[in-house]
Image: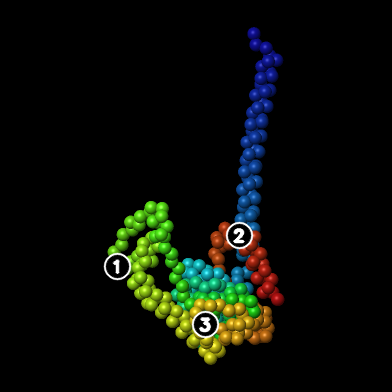
């Protein structure tokens, strides 16, 4: 015979369990909705922030200013210091009718001679086209390819401790043949063309191939570099036996030998040379997704800083 009290207890237990399950379902739903709401809020906030803070080009405004283009790091294709990236920035800086002069803020050890030559040519073209003065202000270093670019400017300024010069060309190579003999490694590379492997570090030295490369590539590139320096610096350059040997000088000696025109930083050139302290930086623009997926805090701080500077 069934016990009524027992049935009543089971019904209550089942009802409590069903109520608990329903409550858990609602709790999970509200938690998921809350998460979605937070994500949506963050996305909307970022979109609004991006839209409300003016873009760099909007910040350029209509006021007179000095256009600044940064040249930082090794000059290489496929980077932000390539001709592909820098030349459009230079074009915008010169083309803007409100830019009174252009400053290239240089801090580079050099790099590709081809990229350097392309940028040098573009500075020369824009300078003649828009009849605006262009200056290079060196920070830590402006050597090799960087100096190749710098000589296209009307004047070059640097700190007394800046490294300037290195008018030369290099091609690094090495050889492993001695080590390979010691550890019993055999070179089995294949090639077609007598001098195809003249730079192969795992084979014997190809003297004829290296001599050809030295005379037809390195020496001729060096001559092009020297020609650009002489053309850019003119009578200001005081040539001596070490000028084109690849050596570098500190800023104070660079003034004496005519590699640069004087000692001074960005502020000095703006105040004393150009006599315009209102400045605008011309930098590569990033798309919305780049800004969103990048370091958001850093990007926002940079934009705010640029925006506040434009309000001066």
Whether residue 55 can be seen here:
yes
Discs 1, 2 touching: Cβ within 8 Å: no
Residue 115's x, y, as percent? 47, 74
Q: Earlier in the sequence, mark 3 or mark 2?
A: 3
Label 1, label 2: how many angstroms apart (C-alpha)? 51 Å
Q: Residues within 10 Å of mark 2 (few under 14, many from 20)?
A: few
Residue 12's x, y, as percent? 68, 23
Q: Is residue 56 above or below residue 10?
A: below
Q: Is residue 66 left or right of residue 145?
A: right
Look at the image and tell me in which quarter the C terminus lies.
Answer: bottom right
> Label 1's element?
loop
Q: Which residue is mark 1?
A: 194
Q: Which residue is mark 2?
A: 295
Q: Disc 1 or disc 2, which is closer to the eye?
A: 1
Q: Please state which of residues 290 and 62 is positioned toward the viewer in this rendering.
A: 290
- The residue under the point 42% across, 63% down is 175
Q: Residue furthest bottom?
A: 235
Q: Which residue is mark 3?
A: 242
Look at the image and tell me in which quarter the N terminus lies.
Answer: top right
Label 3, label 2: how many angstroms apart (C-alpha)? 46 Å
Discs 3, 1 touching: Cβ within 8 Å: no
Q: Residues within 10 Å of mark 3 (few under 14, many from 20)?
A: few
Query: Could you say which quadrant of the image residue 28 lies in?
Result: top right
Whether residue 119 can be seen here:
no
Q: Please state which of residues 157 and 311 is positioned toward the viewer in this rendering.
A: 157
Q: Is residue 56 left or right of residue 245?
A: right
């Amino acid at each position: 015979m069934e016990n009524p009290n027992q049935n009543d207890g089971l019904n209550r237990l089942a009802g409590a369990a069903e109520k608990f399950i329903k409550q858990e379902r609602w709790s999970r739903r509200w938690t998921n909705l809350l998460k979605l709401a937070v994500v949506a809020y963050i996305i909307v906030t970022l979109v609004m922030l991006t839209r409300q803070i003016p873009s760099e080009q909007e910040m350029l405004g209509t006021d007179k200013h000095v256009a600044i283009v940064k040249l930082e790091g090794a000059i290489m294709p496929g980077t932000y210091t390539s001709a592909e990236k820098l030349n459009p920035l230079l074009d915008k800086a010169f083309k803007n009718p409100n830019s009174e002069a252009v400053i290239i803020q240089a801090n580079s050890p050099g790099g590709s001679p081809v990229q350097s030559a392309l940028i040098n040519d573009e500075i020369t073209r824009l300078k003649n086209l828009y009849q605006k003065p262009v200056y290079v202000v060196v920070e830590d270093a402006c050597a090799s390819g960087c100096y190749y670019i710098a000589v296209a400017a009307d004047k070059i300024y640097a700190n007394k401790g800046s490294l300037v010069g290195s008018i030369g060309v290099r091609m690094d190579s090495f050889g492993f043949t001695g080590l390979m003999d010691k550890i019993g490694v055999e070179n089995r590379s294949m090639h077609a063309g007598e001098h195809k492997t003249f730079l192969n570090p795992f084979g014997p030295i190809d003297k004829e191939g290296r001599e050809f490369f030295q005379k037809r590539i390195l020496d001729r590139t060096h001559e092009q570099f020297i020609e650009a320096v002489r053309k850019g610096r003119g009578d200001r350059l005081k040539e001596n036996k070490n000028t084109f040997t690849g050596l570098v000088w500190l800023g104070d000696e660079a003034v004496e030998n005519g590699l640069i025109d004087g000692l001074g930083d960005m502020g000095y050139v703006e105040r004393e040379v150009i006599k315009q302290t209102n400045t605008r930086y011309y930098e590569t623009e990033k798309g919305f997704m780049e800004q969103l997926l990048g370091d958001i805090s850093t990007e926002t701080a940079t934009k705010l800083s640029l925006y506040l500077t434009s309000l001066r």
